[in-house]
Image (spheres, grey):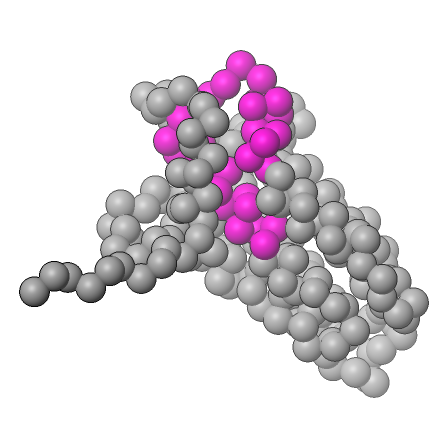
Amino acid sequence: MRPPAGDTDEVHPAVAAYDEHVTQTVIPFADACDALGGLGDTGADIRATWSGIRAVIVIGTRCKKPADVPAALTPHLKPTQDAIGKIRAARLDRAYDWHVKAVMEMLQSVSWVVMSAPPAPTSFVKETVGSTDFWANKIRKEYRGKDDKQIDFCDKLKALILDLAAYVKEHHLSGLSWNPRGVELTDAVVADAAAAAAVPAPAAPAKA
């Protein structure tokens, strides 16, 4: 979920800001999921979800806007959809039903990448606060004064949504930003964007 090594100087401002969003709120929330001990791989799947969205943002910085954005991005969103599907399908203790429901409500916010105003993507992201809080507030009521990790989970979940809304407002106000002077969106971009979303393998040693 970090920019490729050696490419920091060339990273697009929208990608750099996204990386900051991930560092400040996504990773802390994923860590809060891990800390609870009963959410299985939810934390890892959250990280994978945001890594997949990063790849799509990179596509936007390199490509012209396609005529049908949702259809064109469908194959590129598969890693994100797979990660979300794992969270939805996880078999967890029923004590974590509210947690999973809160997370699933929050995950609706990632659909901003296929939206175009109206409605404004920023408003769409913010609207998930209410539906997420419906379940998070049950957790707060149950664990307030008993388990700080539970409250931390709720607080960081909400912080993630609000920070994502701020990011989208700043860089993608009318929908995912595209590059009018970029290349056409083709299947070849999938591998290119995937490489941008992942930490590259170490370079081979230089020959003597």
Query: Visible in this render: residue 170?
Result: no
Left or right of 206 in this view: 130: right
Q: In the rendered structure, which segment of residues is drawn in magenta?
A: 48-77
Q: Residue at x 81, y 53 (%)?
A: 89
Asked which quadrant contains residue 168, the reply is: top right
Name the main secondary structure of what is drawn in magenta: helix
State the residue lying farthest toward the front.
208
Q: Give the vertical position of 102 relative to 55 (above or below).
A: below
Residue 178 in the image, given as x and y percentages of width and height: 43, 27
Residue 51 in the image, given as x and y percentages of width and height: 53, 51
Report the number of discs.
0
State the residue lying farthest toward the top.
67
State the residue lying farthest toward the left.
208
Q: Give the vertical position of 71 relative to 80 (above or below).
A: above
Q: Residue at x 62, y 22 (%)?
A: 71
Q: Is residue 58 shown in magenta? A: yes
Q: Residue at x 70, y 65 (%)?
A: 41
